[in-house]
Image (cartoon, helix red, strand yellow):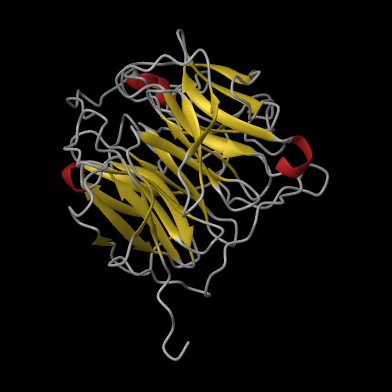
Amino acid sequence: MKMPLTMRALAPAAVFAVASVAIAPASPASQTAVTRPAPRMAANPAFDFSAPQVAASNLTVPWGLAFLPDGSALVSERNSARILKVTPGSQPTEVAKLTGVQPAGEGGLLGIAVSPTYAQDGYVYAYYTAASDNRIVRFKLAASPQQEVVYSGIPKNSFHNGGRIAFGPDGMLYAGTGDAGQKPNAQNASSPSGKILRMKPDGSPAPGNPDPKTVIYTLGHRNVQGLAWSSAGQMYAAEFGQDTWDEANYIVAGGNYGWPEVEGPGGEPKFRSPIATWATKEASPSGATVAGDTLYVAGLGGRRLWQVPLDGKGGTSGRPTAVLQGTNGRLRTVAFGPDGWLWVTTSNRDGRGSPGASDDRILRFPQVKPAGG
């Protein structure tokens, strides 16, 4: 939701007193063994966007997407609080329904993540809007699962709830939050609003965080709904702007990304500038994933999928280009699956789209076969 931009001359707020450093793998003592399946792909895959396969249809606001070790996908529905298992060629099946979810506006059952040690512990994680806050829970798949709260107290609103969660290559759990309409909190190091959080799987602060006593990893965000890593472990995030610039950012520990003092490129050394920006009508960037040397960002308001070429050094090697422009409506989530296909979800039944007869859908796009392959 785009809100009117107010004066940017805000009172000074607390900022991390820590240098911005590139993400490095955690030390062996703190690293969790990651057992997720590796995607099948060429070194730098391209995808055939003219030949989608419909993996699921007739869903209502599919929001989160994560993969089980067998390659099937878990999908969260924002308003129903259902978690569906999706296997190409089969009908989706409900594998859990969470209690305590309070959908309203942009809130509800949002992000989902599968434990990197799922084969041993069986845990699935979800980020959802409850009666008093946004929170992260973990549970084992069941019709009415027992939910363990691992992190709570993230401010909620009818908009700017963030919601994306994902396990990084270091085995730590990352969460993108929104400012919940309280802009100064994005610069407040005591608030989890407008941040990227990094925690152990049990919700406690992860080793190597800028402040070892908190889960806050970066600050100065308006509404983060996309988290992604390259094969080299570099982290990227997609962020909703207000009236001028939506952003893709290269994420470094302790980085300050400027909101609400800056929207888009900041021009001040204390703020990190985005690696790519778009006019808000062209993007409203939600999900993000990396395949090869390309960052893919799903656009809601822009109704397209953005391709951002990466240079492997935290920058870009060319201008972003768009595919799927207007062909499938609002795009919520994009993920590079362990099957080597690019998965994309639509969000046309979220109250802001024009749903077709089979919306919402989950689409899969195959890799382009190399010449002579």
Residue at the spot 19% in from the left edge and 27% down from the top edge = 5
Relative to 106, 166 lies left or right: right
Q: Position of residue 367 (x, y in %)?
A: 43, 70
The furthest residue to the bottom = 372
Residue 328 at what x, y percent from top left?
23, 50
**Which residue is the extreme one toward the top?**
132
Q: Horizontally, is 213 left or right of 359 in the view?
A: right
Position of residue 134 measured from the top left corner of the image (x, y, whole percent): 48, 18
Identify which residue, 232 or 323, lies in the foreground. Answer: 323
Residue at position x 64%, y 52% in the image:
70
Q: Is residue 163 above or below residue 268?
A: above
In the image, 87 versus 337, the foreground residue is: 87
Give percent across and percent down for residue 353. Answer: 19, 36
Q: Is residue 126 visible?
A: yes
Q: Name the outermost residue toward the right.
A: 29
Give me the residue at 62% from left, 35% from top: 210
Looking at the picture, does residue 250 appear above or below residue 178?
below
If the image is split into quadrants, where does the N terminus sit? top left
User: Which is nearer the eye, 51 or 104?
Assistant: 51
Q: Is residue 267 visible?
A: no
**Count of numbered circles in the view:** 0
